[in-house]
Image (spheres, grey):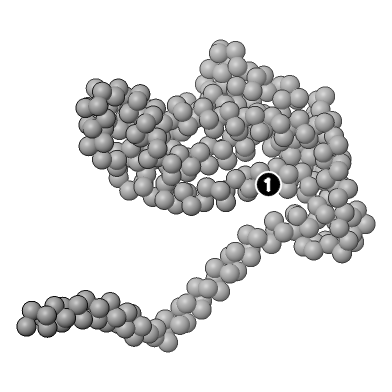
Amino acid sequence: MENVDATKVRRKKKEKPQAELTYVQKIKLTPMGYVFQFINGLFLTLFALACLIPFLNVIGTSFATTKEVLLRDFIIIPHSFSLSAYRYVFSTPTVTRAIGVSVFVTVVGTALSLLVTSLMAYGLSRTYLYGRRVLNFLVLFTMLFSGGMIPSFLIVSNLKLTNTLWALIIPSTVSAYNMIIMRNFFQGISPSLEEAAKIDGANHLQIFGRVMLPLSKASFATIGLFYAVTYWNTYRSAILYLTDTKKWPIQVLLRQIVLMSSGSDFDTGSVEVVPPSQSVRMAVIVVATLPILLVYPFIQRYFIHGAMLGSVKG
């Protein structure tokens, strides 16, 4: 009898997943469900094409010859490929220097922002921190109200940061939004890990470096991408704080190229601006956009996970 009962139990365990699978297979969409799926898929496809086609036009035009650009208004696949625009872009010291400035600001700024933001977020995530509520309120207050352009310029000027690359990094070191996401992520980590580390004799820096950081790869990848995109697209700060044209990032140079191509009256200063050829302009846009696009696939698996973990708790 015991053997028979054991056999029945094993059969029931085996039959249960099959029954659940059969139940899932029996679910069928109604006619309206099929219509909704079709309309939803069509809408998402058109939306994706609306986002993708302009970028394909930029890439196709950058590889087209000058004659083809003059004859065709819209190019996705050029009839004859040419690298002359990219050769010109990388042959001029102006564009390569601007790209170097953007790379320096992005790498150094992202590393500094991650360090400062993570230390601040870890401190504010500890419930026993004295004055924690007041500090959190001050951080939230900066998201609603800011001093504005003139006070920011006066602070940067008084700190002797004008006309230096640090003027593009230090004012943007900490983002209140990114800090809150990382703080919520640290709050979601079990306090028992910190208690166990304290029992082993670890101090706060050791807990942060050996316990919190290894568990925060997803959050660091997400916040790092946010900061990298911000620093790479630096534009207003460069216009306000930099008078030396040799320190302009790539985004400001793109503005000068667009103004020159549109025939606007502006002062280029001492910078040598790329001629307003359509293919050259598109090549500069591709060069300015490509680095961020290449970084995203490597951290895509952390992106959604890190953003969700840091935004669930308030």
Q: How many marks?
A: 1
35 vs 247, left or right, is left
Vertical arrangement, residue 57 with respect to residue 31, above or below:
above
Q: Residue 56, can we see it? A: yes
Please tell me how crowded label 1 is: few (under 14), some (14-19), or many (20+) other residues with Cα within 10 Å: few
Q: Is residue 144 visible?
A: no
Q: Nearer the viewer, residue 81 or 142?
A: 81
Q: In terms of depth relative to the viewer, which is nearer, 231 or 9?
A: 9
**Residue 305 falls left or right of residue 165:** left
Residue 312, given in percent of the width and then of the height, sits at 32, 48
Q: Which residue is tagged 1? A: 290
Q: Residue 145: x percent and y percent?
A: 42, 31
Q: Residue furthest right?
A: 67
- Name the image quarter holding residue 153: top right
Residue for point 22% across, 31% down: 195
Q: Amino acid at mark 1?
A: Leu
With respect to residue 246, does 296 lie above or below?
below
Q: Seen in the image, is 218 located left or right of residue 196?
A: right
Taking the spot 45% from the left edge, 82% from the top edge, the residue there is 34
Judged left or right of residue 225, residue 93 is right
Farthest residue, direction left: 1
- Residue at image x 75%, y 58%? 57
Vertical position of residue 123 compared to residue 232: above or below: above
